[in-house]
């Protein structure tokens, strides 16, 4: 079940209000402050004797601390000692839950996939029109990646040293895919999209195609390569989604002017 998501972000501060996302399979409220408040900006939180955590709370606090550090530093080069300092616990505490830093990063990536899934679900929850829902989901996807670039890169990082990460990405995609498939299927049934999308194989292909488009655009935007007539990333995303919708409208529209 998707968790409710209510957040707002300031372009200047980067502050994100309380979000409800899931780490692993357990829902809980994530108090995410992705940049420090003015009175503590650019400072590391010192451990406090009043800081106490239940077993599960410490794990969540450590993941949150890692997300905050990544948002500030734009990378994941910090140490577990820094994570412990930010969380306000002893430097040995993280090892009770994360024997290696890569274990903490895996948990952070899982949190990112859950947050992305929640944002996409919330974006289309009350939109009945398939075209509008498709566009909204596409915008929400690109917006997520460009707001949390370090987290987004981590979510989809698969290296030769961690080939097992590919299966995690696939599982996250499998969990997100039904919402998009439902939009495409509804549109096909009412003639808004190509009727062929009512067939399973065609639907899966169109869904993968759509993911490839928005994921590719997101990565290009993060790398500063999504340049088009000096337009904003938001405007570029709108144009790309509109072009994608034309391709989904039907075979006649998609092949109009084609030489094949």
Image (cartoon, grey):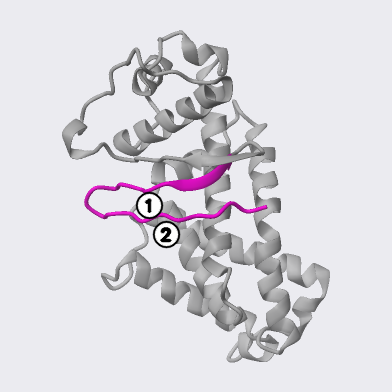
Dot 2: element: helix
Q: Residue at x 47, y 63 (%)?
A: 140
Q: Quadrant of residue 239?
A: bottom left
Above or below residue 192? Residue 41 is above
Q: Which mark is residue 143?
A: 2
Dot 1: element: helix
Q: Residue at x 52, y 57 (%)?
A: 119
Q: Is residue 147 left or right of residue 250?
A: left
Does the CB distance between marks 2 and 1 fall below 8 Å?
yes
Above or below residue 191? Residue 227 is above
Q: Position of residue 221 (x, y in %)?
A: 38, 57
Gap in angstroms between the C-alphas marked 2 and 1 = 6 Å
Q: Which mark is residue 53?
A: none
Q: Which mark is residue 147?
A: 1
Q: Quadrant of residue 79?
A: top left
47 or 114, which lies in front?
47
28 or 13, which lies in front?
28
């Amino acid at each position: 079940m998707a968790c409710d998501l209510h957040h707002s972000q300031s372009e200047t501060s980067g502050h994100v209000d309380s979000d409800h996302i899931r780490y692993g399979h357990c829902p809980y409220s994530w108090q995410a402050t992705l940049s420090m408040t003015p009175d503590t900006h650019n400072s590391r939180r010192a451990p406090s004797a009043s800081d106490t955590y239940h077993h599960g709370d410490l794990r969540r606090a450590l993941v949150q601390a890692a997300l905050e550090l990544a948002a500030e530093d734009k990378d994941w080069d910090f140490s577990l000692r820094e994570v412990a300092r930010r969380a306000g616990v002893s430097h040995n505490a993280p090892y009770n839950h994360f024997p290696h830093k890569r274990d903490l990063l895996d948990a952070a990536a899982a949190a990112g996939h859950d947050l992305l899934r929640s944002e996409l679900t919330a974006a289309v929850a009350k939109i009945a029109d398939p075209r509008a829902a498709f566009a909204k989901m596409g915008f929400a996807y690109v917006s997520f990646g460009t707001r949390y670039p370090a987290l987004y890169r981590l979510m989809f990082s698969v290296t030769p040293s961690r080939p097992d990460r590919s299966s995690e990405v696939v599982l996250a995609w499998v969990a997100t895919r039904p919402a998009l498939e439902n939009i495409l299927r509804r549109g096909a049934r009412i003639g808004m999209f190509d009727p062929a999308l009512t067939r399973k194989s065609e639907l899966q292909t169109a869904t993968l195609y759509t993911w490839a488009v928005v994921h590719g655009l997101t990565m290009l935007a993060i790398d500063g390569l999504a340049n088009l007539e000096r337009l904003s990333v938001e405007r570029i995303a709108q144009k790309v989604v509109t072009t994608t919708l034309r391709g989904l409208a039907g075979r006649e529209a998609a092949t109009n002017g084609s030489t094949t």
